[in-house]
Amino acid sequence: MWADFLSRAQILSKFLIVTAMAGVGLLTSFDDMKNVGIKPFIVGLVASLIMAGFSIVLIFALSI
């Protein structure tokens, strides 16, 4: 029962992540990004890298 739940949750999580990424990508305007400048891009990149690193640490720490 628990393994079945985890399997379905994994499929659902992949679908939701792909949907969210597509939503963000469809709303991206490169002209607006160019007008804002490089500093917000760097801040976003650094924040994304920190979140990715934290996520990887949690995945390894909580994996069974």
Image (cartoon, rainbow, N blue to C red):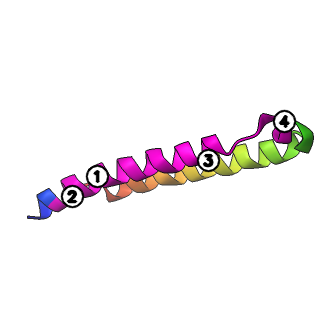
Q: CA distance from mark 3 to mark 4?
A: 15 Å
Residue at image point 84% right, 42% down? 32
Residue at image point 62% right, 41% down? 25
Q: Position of residue 54 (x, y in %)?
A: 53, 54
Q: Quick one: label 4 or label 1, which is nearer the N terminus? A: 1
Whether residue 59 can be seen here: yes
Q: Confirm whether the magenta stretch covers residue 60.
A: no
Circle on res. 10: 1
Q: Quick one: label 2 or label 4, which is nearer the N terminus? A: 2
Segment tinted magenta in the rendering: 5-33
Circle on res. 6: 2
Q: Position of residue 26 (x, y in %)?
A: 62, 41
Query: What quarter of the picture does the C terminus occupy?
Result: bottom left
Q: Which residue is mark 4?
A: 31
Q: CA distance from mark 3 to mark 1?
A: 21 Å
Please identify the residue farthest to the bottom as the structure is shown: 1
Judging depth in this view, the residue of 38 and 19 nearest the camera is 19
Q: Which residue is mark 3?
A: 24
Query: What quarter of the picture does the N terminus occupy?
Result: bottom left
